[in-house]
Amino acid sequence: MARTPPGPRSLLPSRLLRTLQRDPIPLFTRLARDYGDASMFSVLGQKIVFFNHPDLIAELLVAQNRFFYKSRVLQRSKIVFGEGLLTSEDPLHLRQRRLAQPAFHRERIARYAEAMVACAARTRERWRDGETLDVHHEMMRLTLDVVAKTLFGADVGGEADEIGAALTQLVDLFPLLMNPLAPLLQKLPIVPSTRRFRRAVERLDRTIYAMIEARRGSEEDRGDLLSMLLLAQDVEGDGGGMTDRQLRDEAMTLFLAGHETTANALAWTWYLLGLHPDVAEALHAHVDDVLGDRLPTAADYPRLHFAEAVLAESMRLFPPAWAVSRLAMQDVTIGEWLVPRGAVAVAAQAVMHRDARFWVEPARFDPSRFSASGAPHPAFGHPLPASGERDGGATRPKFAYFPFGGGPRICIGEGFAWMEGVLLLATLAQRWRMELLSRDVAAQASITLRPRGGIAVRVRHRV
């Protein structure tokens, strides 16, 4: 018979809610330390079950996924994403994923490489030797440029700062959705955070609907995601295409997800390279050896294996998607543990990726953990940092490392993100190295894992 997981019984609801909203990772780290693989606590009547073992996470995301929906926090985020891939449930989710999937096929992603590298080349030409920058802000601008070009065929250079500010406001205000009173607060126009939230959504809507209007009626395939979504017909379903609202919801989801997560991954990567100049020098030597003076292409991606290992190790220590959560639609047994109907089940990459049972010296930045991987890349068939590797003699189960989630809801843009991250890192590392101006950078866990207050660096020309 399944058992209820153990957990703390004396937490003050108001204090716990503030912790979940402001600094949740230490809370889940303590739960793993004190209660092991499974724990449960309640906040304002909401039961939360936390799983911290790869086998249990695999059951949650794969084997038993059909008994779970996205959590209430993500359901509330429909105010931003609508019924996009991040928030919708079957059968709509299945239909929309089927329509979007061709845009992320291997051959299609390879066609995006030229635009990715061109965006990075423009960024590196803009920097000046000795200049002080917030590298997080710079990576946000860069990935916004990439996602606009590759997925929507648009140039948002003149609007980049304004769009970036709106996206940042949404991320900063996302903890509001964790408040049990969020549905009421969202209806009160007098609440300042509600007004800021609405203005940010309206600003992004203007950009996205303008893209759709400019392209609606054209049957030209420009090689981007928006072309494919406009032309797609659900031949396995109702035979129809997407309405403007459906296009908007998918565009908003991919706009935020494709921009925010890769920017954070790259920013944390530069931070770690600044802390470890020996690894930075190894990366520069590797990039020089593979590319020489020329810009990278899609064909170079499989050869940039050390750059990929650096990015993978960065996402282990600072996973942009720091946790996944699911809402139990009925009583579900995960391993020996009962997840009651209505409970939220959580698995945290930010905790699992640093578990000493599966990672030797888990706090140490060591790309060599991944550089000899033998696992096939899901999109390109070359080694990808993944499961089954041996790290200092310890064999890692699959869900000891899951930066893109897993199961049927795994990130649709995983292959895109790996290529983008590696090519942008290599292009910038050809020309520049970063000197950290402060080693004291805190992680802020909101919808993604951001560096609180940015990352100040001085850029130094390598040539």
Image (spheres, helix red, strand yellow):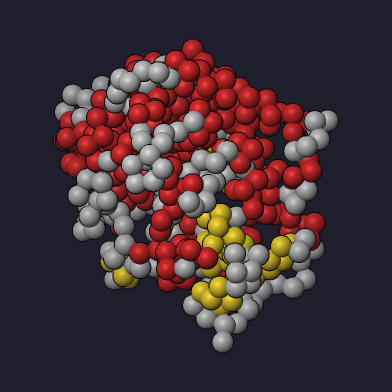
Tell me: 172 left or right of 305.
right
x and y percentages locating residue 41 in the rendered image: 68, 68
Residue 413 lies, with reference to residue 333, above or below; the image says above
Q: Nearer the viewer, residue 285 or 261?
A: 261
Q: Is residue 71 above or below residue 260?
A: below
How far across and how far down the image is residue 86, in percent? 51, 45
Tell me if residue 17 comes above or below residue 294 in the rendering: below
Residues 222 and 422: in front is 222
Judged left or right of residue 146, residue 74 is right
Quadrant in the rendering for residue 265? top left
Residue at figure coordinates x 43%, y 49% from the top left: 94
Can you give x and y, in whole percent of width and height, for residue 210 in the image? 51, 17
Work out whether residue 380 can be spotted. yes
Q: Is residue 109 left or right of residue 167?
A: left
Residue 340, image quadrant: bottom right
Between residue 248 and residue 412, name the one nearer to us.
248
Residue at (40%, 58%) from the top-left corner? 407
Residue occupying the point 63% across, 79% down: 4
Residue furthest to the bottom in view is 1
Quadrant holding the C terminus: top left
Q: Residue at x 48, y 57 (%)?
A: 349
